[in-house]
Image: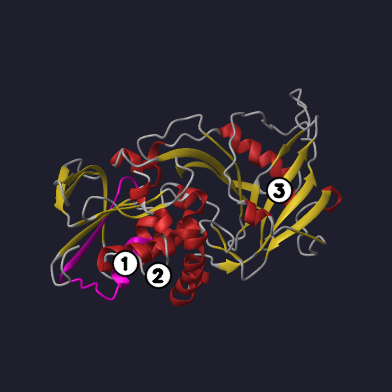
Amino acid sequence: MSATGDRRDIVIVGGGIIGCCSAYYLTRHPSYDPARHKITLIEATELAGGASGKAGGMLAQWAFPSNLVGLSYKLHAELAKEHDGINRWGYREVNCGQLVVKGRALAENTPGKTGAGNTESLQKRSTAAMSKLRSAKIPEDLDWIEPDLLRAYESMSGPGETAQVHPYLFTTSIAKLAQEKGANIILGQVTDIARSKSSVESVTYTDKTSGETQTIAATDVLVAAGPWTKTILPEVPISAMRAHSVVIQPKKPVSAYCLFTNIEIPANFNPEKKSRPTVAAPEIYARPDATVYACGDGDRAVPLPKSTADVEVDQERCQEIIDHVGSISDELRDGEVRTRQACYLPNCDSGAGPLVGLTDVKGLYIAAGHTCWGIQNAPGTGKLMSEFVFDGKAKSANIGSLDPREFM
């Protein structure tokens, strides 16, 4: 790390929520001086173009890893209070529970699709999180799930332990707040991080608008490119999983719940196909903008593309989510499907993660591999990265178990 009085050229690679929160907290660090410190964020396509704009946006005290969650959950509340997050990015506390429910067969005129196959759990809840489930009466305000289909409701957490944000609005708002304090945002594809034997020297990228190759000096480089981190730093053990989701506009707003479901799909679910009874487990999140977000399992059927702009959306997988949630809710069945989308989540091959901190190269940092908890853990990660850059170590949390050097 350079002496405090020296000029610093700090480059962040990746315009998702981790990169944007890092830029935000770097501009808020007590040592930051815009006269001496230049902060440049480089994003290949658009801010929040990947999972940061297409995630569910759930925040939970029982998320993982535990050494990052407490700090980050608290910072979410502080950010919302300081910057009117309730109105700017839909921050609110919510109830969270698990539904056991019987699905209805599709109507004959419903063009449903099932059997996409090759699914993989997003593994959002740990064993510790599952242990929080408590049998409960079905809440009276959970009136948008058909009551005659409900078999059980298990409360997982309530306001104070569970909250939510709108991921796209949160990411872009935090980026704007960083810009207002001096961070510069460039759209371009990073092609090289030049390093000497001991430290980083520069970053080369292809400008998105002009197509020209540009190289900028760098004393510090933070790679926060999610699943694309490995394309920039091949030695980083991060892989990608695709996840599909939909956004539905019900005819009227629904109550504030984040729901994990266990839906019994009947054998005659889709009259067009011979299907056996099975179980579906979409996650359903009501949002304060009167929409409902729903996502299904992940898959690895299509390799990670070059950028977020090239992500392939499997319409069958999206239709399957729509059919499943519509089978338990008239509000969702009869609502307008606003968005069908897909994104890639960054997973650490070691099974640990995320990787947050220093590497063996002076001035090179990694903040990636947050799986499905990137939105939840972004503020804590960003604050810690600002400490690594300006203080040389993490001060706000003990994250030794996330040290990238242990896995590279």
Q: Is 80 positioned to the left or the right of 387 in the image?
A: right
**Identity of the residue drawn at 82% across and 62% down:** 137
Mark 2 Cα within 10 Å, few/some/many (few <14, many 20+)?
few
Lower position in the chain sequence, tag 3 or tag 1: 3
Q: Is 329 positioned to the left or the right of 229 in the image?
A: right
Which element carries disc 3, helix, strand or loop? strand
Q: Specify the segment rendered in magenta.
A: 21-47
Asked whether disc 2 touches disc 1, contact meaning CB atoms under 8 Å apart, the reply is: yes
Regarding residue 169, the answer to whether it shows in the image is no
Which element carries disc 2, helix, strand or loop? loop
Q: Amino acid at mark 2?
A: Ser
Which element carries disc 1, helix, strand or loop? helix
Q: Is 158 positioned to the left or the right of 264 in the image?
A: left
Q: Amino acid at mark 1?
A: Glu
Lower position in the chain sequence, tag 3 or tag 2: 3
Q: Which residue is mark 3?
A: 261
Q: Could you tell me which quadrant the C terminus lies in?
A: top left
Regarding residue 244, the answer to whether it shows in the image is yes
Mark 3 Cα within 10 Å, few/some/many (few <14, many 20+)?
some
Q: Is residue 141 above or below residue 355?
A: below
Q: Which residue is mark 1?
A: 387
Distance of label 3 from label 2 (alpha carbons): 35 Å
227 or 4, which lies in front? 4
Q: Which residue is mark 2?
A: 396
